[in-house]
Image (cartoon, rainbow, N blue to C red):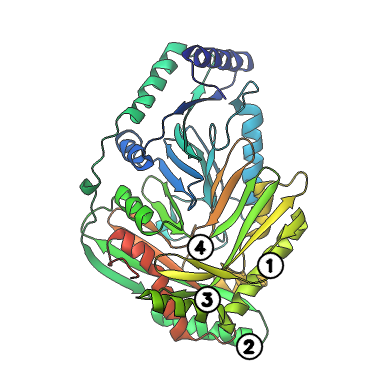
Amino acid sequence: MIAITEQLIHDHLSKAIECARNESNTKLVSVVKKVRPIDPLIFYANGYRQFCKERFFWRDPNQQYTFVGLGRAYTLSSKEGSARFFDTEKQWKRFKKDILYTNNVEFPNGTGPLLFGGFSFDPYQKKDSYWTDFSNSKFVIPSVLYTEADGNGYLSINIKVSGEDNIQDHLKHIEELEGLLINQEYDGSSYSSPLLLTKEEIDVQRFTKNVQNATSLIQQEKIEKVVLARQLKATFTEAISTEYVIQRLLREQPTSYTFIFENENQHFVGASPERLVQKEGDYVFSTCLAGSIKRGKTRKEDALLGDELLNDQKNLIEHDVVVHMIKEAMDAYCMEVEIPMQPTLYKTKHIQHLYTPVRGKIKKGVTLFSLLKELHPTPALGGYPQRESLSIIRKLEPFDRGWYAAPIGWIDINGNGEFIVGIRSGVIERQQAMLFAGCGIVADSTPESEYEETTIKFNPMLSALGGIASGPY
């Protein structure tokens, strides 16, 4: 880690500029300083003036890692289809070899030139206009990164240098960026929700017909399960404040991953309860989350609903399909896999799910990107078998999922990282928000029950936007 003293920072930058001069190539150098922990939402808000539309936010439910990224020092994107995972990893490896200057520096996990972004759910769907800013794969290394890891705070500043640069200019720039840490004034009440004008559920009749068509295919044993989604468009009186939405999500959905990825016009935001895969050293962790029911209005009703879910055959079958697929994928990449025999309950503010964790020790050479390619989409987001269910989704759904239900997350220079599936989410564009919600269709699914389930799944984002009152009791 490049730490602490100004002399070390000066020396590191000086060597990076010399390296760039010798190789006649631009280099990216990362400076990491340990800082006192701050409120990450304030840091995000303070970056608005200088880095508006180039920010990201991430917090996992255990608060193991919180990230706020401002600006874009480097961007990786891919237009590839099924090869988008491979292409992104290839670009990442090339960046680390040819562009990143480290001089054998060791970075604490989750700091330095951290890569944050996501992938499209299905690159072969026709793109809708509200996904214009999102490619099939898009990742950024921020100019400034605030990391909070296990109670410690770190500031990473990523700078492009060339052989002709003046080191004093970079030192002054670092000092200016550090000033974002000092200003800790933030009045949460100044960020408020605009008034909801309209709430439009899009093409409900087609969704119910799709459920009927899917159950028919399952009963004919063409597939075992398919996940179908629908949309809801909320329009407000004025532009939606992403600071306000994140603030609400952090407060209302503490058991979920809170995230946002800003672009020039469109911002993808949500609070997902579902980890896809986490890598920490030689171990990887995944989550089977399928089968859901609403929360109760009282504690007694909530417990009864939870017991109903744990004993509901339709949901247990749906959950077992996900467990089976994830275990198969992990077995292929791991030397040992641990998985409980029975699911438990995972409760968020509006919904409770059947939950089974998975842990494995990976084989040599296995990377996060290779695991993502193998796991996405799980039966919880696509269906089973995978290829057949994706084909049905393309035929039945009249819209582009974009990054909805797709992997979004981070990876650091040490190969550690975590990706979730982008559910309980929506795309914000000025005063409009397009929300998405899906449900797993099995043989005995009914249009009425699946419509109700998706209605419940819209609630986390609607509440965060200020469109409904929060719950459950």
> Residue placed at 62% from the left, 27% from the top?
106
Label 3 is placed on what type of residue?
Leu
How far apart marks 4 and 2 lie (CA) works out to 29 Å
Q: Disc 3 or disc 2, which is closer to the eye? A: 2
Q: Disc 4 or disc 2, which is closer to the eye? A: 2
Q: Earlier in the sequence, mark 3 or mark 4?
A: 4
Say left or right for 180 vs 364. left
**Residue receiving disc 1:** 325
Q: Earlier in the sequence, mark 4 or mark 2?
A: 4
Query: Which element type, helix, strand or loop, lies under badge 4?
Result: loop
> Residue placed at 58% from the left, 12% from the top?
18
**Residue receiving disc 4:** 126
How many neighbours does mark 2 have within 10 angstroms: few (below 14), some (14-19), or many (20 or more)? few
Label 1 is placed on what type of residue?
Met
Query: Which element type, helix, strand or loop, lies under badge 3?
Result: helix
Quadrant where the C terminus lies? Answer: bottom left
How far apart marks 1 and 3 lie (CA) works out to 23 Å
Q: Earlier in the sequence, mark 1 or mark 3?
A: 1
Rendered position, 328 above or below 50: below
Observer-nearest residue: 470 or 76?
Answer: 470
Q: Earlier in the sequence, mark 4 or mark 1?
A: 4
Spot the residue most to the front.
300
Quadrant housing residue 415: top right
**Residue receiving disc 3:** 396
How many neighbours does mark 3 have within 10 angstroms: few (below 14), some (14-19), or many (20 or more)? some
Quadrant housing residue 184: top left
Percent x, y of residue 55: 40, 41
Quadrant where the N terminus lies? Answer: top right
